[in-house]
Image (spheres, helix red, strand yellow):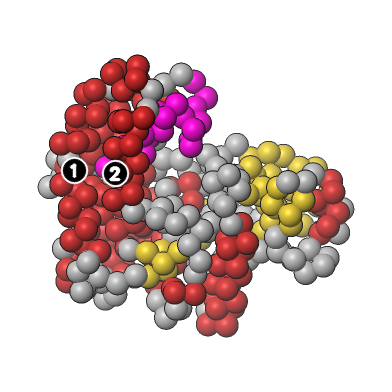
Amino acid sequence: MQEIFEKYGWDVINHDTIQQGLINRTYSVHTTQGDFIVQSINHNVFKNPWAIDQNINNIGAYILQTNPSYLYTHLVPTLQGDTLIEWGGGFYRAFHKIKGYALSVLDNKIQVEEAAQQFAKFTFVLKDFDCNQLKDTLPQFHDLNLRYQQFSQALLNGDPNRIQSSKNEIDFLLAHKNYVETYDQFIQHKEVKKRVTHHDTKISNVLFDSIHDEEKAICVIDLDTTMAGYFISDIGDMCRTCLCAVSEEEKDLNKVKVDAEKWQSLKRGYLHYMQDSLSPFEMDHLFFGGQFMIYMQALRFLTDHLNKDIYYGASYEGQNYFRTLNQIRLLEEYNNLS
């Protein structure tokens, strides 16, 4: 890492690996010039790191021009003025470290409302930004048709033993294919529009801090998946990660419960900024956002399990299978709200 640090001209005191996130490697770097975050972009997942760099810089330039007080993770240039470094077969970038902390689960409904407000504010601040300028950093990332096709392929070509032992979960996901049909109807509707969409609104991607002895969400982070998209992607992943007191890694399914008060707080926080931006048809699909995302994540986890963990990987045998069980239970609990 020292050669990377030298490209920024930093006098490094120490650095540590941050154990968070499934995709990129992240480091906290303490220097005499200040504190920074350095990330190595996983270009096995993100095939075009330059597109990510361009998106973050374009949005950053727009925010500096239109809303400079908005707290945003601007990229730090090297001594040569580059914001993306290709070195040693990898791609690296740096951000100023923002004082704050991320959470993996939320303890109370106030945190949920705060987080939802920040994700909604991100889209709201960029409501006049031409989202067609953004590159697709993960093409068809939240395309439910694609995820269902990949699941169908895994049923044909996946590991036979894993297919056999996952029969109940496969049957459940097949029985809920109507979500794919609802998704098709949604994206084709004339009242639905594409916006600047974060696409990864899990709770660990919003920073909190204590302000006047109150816990406040202060900004969103991890913009690699920011692309043009539909609001159901963002509100859906918030439903998936904010309404339950345990994460997708929890294997005790009795702990997978959805808090109805948190759902009301999530809606209140999101609509604080987005109510006037959403069409009546979009407003009617707030709840579907959660169904769409939880179902899709269950599909993706089971697909990866059947394909022997080639996308997410697994730190223990059957991890993606247990993640699937978790998401299926979450979907059942979420549907009990309706």
Q: Residue at x 60, y 76 (%)?
A: 61
- Which label belongs to residue 177? 1
* Position in image of residue 239 (x %, y %): 30, 48
CA separation, marks 2 and 1?
A: 8 Å
Dividing the image into 4 quarters, which one contains the N terminus? top right
Total residue callouts: 2
Residue in the picture at 60% in, 36% down? 19
What residue is at 34 percent from the left and 33 percent from the top? 154
Residue 32, picture quadrant: bottom right
Q: Nearer the viewer, residue 57 or 117?
A: 57
Residue at the image position 48 percent from the left and 62 percent from the top: 136
Residue type highlighted by circle 2: Tyr
Contact (Cβ within 8 Å) of mark 2 with mark 1: yes
Q: Nearer the viewer, residue 71 or 224?
A: 224
Q: Is residue 249 visible?
A: no
Q: Quadrant of residue 160?
A: top left
Callout 1, which amino acid?
A: Lys
Residue corresponding to mark 2: 148
Vertical arrangement, residue 231 with respect to residue 337, above or below: below
**Position of 223 relative to 55 (above/below):** above
Crowdedness near tag 1: few (<14), some (14–19) or many (≥20) residues, C-alpha within 10 Å:
few
Q: Please provide percent x and percent y for residue 336.
A: 14, 40
Mark 2 neighbour class, 10 Å CA radius: few under 14, some 14 to 19, many 20 or more: many
On screen, 17 above or below 207?
Answer: above
Image x and y of residue 40, in percent: 67, 47
In magenta, the rendered stretch is 294-316
User: Is residue 237 a member of the stretch shown in magenta?
Assistant: no
Q: What element does badge 1 sit on?
A: loop
Q: Is residue 36 left or right of residue 194?
A: right
